[in-house]
Amino acid sequence: MEMKIGIDKREREMYDSFADLYAIIKTTEKLEKIYVRDTISSEEYEPECFKLIAQFKTLTSTLKDTVPSIERFCDTYKMDCPSALHRLITSGVPATVEHRAARAASSTTSAAIVAECVQHFITAMDTLKLNMIAIDQVHPVLADLLSSLNKLSLLPPEFEGRVKMKEWITRLSKMGAADELTEQQARQLHFDLESSYNLFMAALPSAGS
């Protein structure tokens, strides 16, 4: 993708976001193709696909004013990615989840909630990576994550990730909106989010069976 010389900071950030969006769509198209060709296992495909979907949703929500149509974006940059568009826009969940849902109608709701949980995990971790550590920035994303986890009945009642998020939300609720996490707190929260995300992904095969 070509970039004009002499653009300002805001334009540069916009083009950087365009490049990220381009990369996500292209990567998803490649992932779908190698999955269909059976050169990647379901166990490897599913978490990677979930991650791309979550990143896509997070990025497109921030670009909704500058990129109102993903299809038009693809046309502009000559991207022929029908599989990616289906996965990212139409389906919103990995092919493996779609297949499980087809075998059991009740899985449809669960699949949507699983995708929602993954998106909130990624959003929460990205929030900390962007150094957004004020309580009124962190608390809402953790509350959204906990709400999604609570809706997913396939997880065990004492799922560690859910317990940790409850503890963090309780702790943050006692602080002021303008207060900020310390460097140590932010580091610990990111560690707890990452470990909870890994436990969540590990729980999915048994949850979806």
Image (cartoon, rainbow, N blue to C red):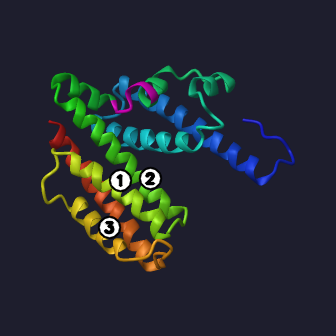
Query: Residue 207 appears at what percent x and percent y?
Result: 16, 42
Q: Secondary structure at mark 3?
A: helix
Kind of residue sitting beneath label 1:
Asp
Q: Position of residue 165 (x, y in %)?
A: 29, 63
Instruction: Inspect the image, locate mark 3, and give the three-letter code of the amino acid beneath it.
Output: Ile
Q: Are marks 1 and 2 in contact (CB under 8 Å)?
A: yes
Q: Quadrant of residue 23?
A: top right
At x 46%, y 75%, the residue is 181
Residue type at tag 2: Thr
95 vs 186: above or below? above
* Image location of residue 97, percent across then percent down: 27, 32
User: Of callouts 1 and 3, which one flags the residue occurring earlier in the amino acid sequence?
Assistant: 1
Name the residue carrying label 2: 123
Q: Which label is found at residue 144?
A: 1
Which residue is depicted at the point 25% across and 56% down?
Answer: 199
> Would you say residue 90 sits in the magenta stretch?
yes
**Residue 169 — which label?**
3
**Residue 126 rendering spot, x and y as whole percentages:** 48, 57
Sequence-first tag of 3 and 2: 2
Which label was assigned to residue 156?
Answer: none
- Label 1, label 3: how many angstroms apart (C-alpha)? 11 Å
Q: Nearer the viewer, mark 3 or mark 2?
A: 3
Q: Is residue 20 above or below residue 123?
A: above
Which residue is farthest right? Answer: 6
Q: Is residue 177 left or right of residue 117?
A: right
Front-most of residues 30 and 96 = 96
Q: Which residues are magenta?
A: 89-94
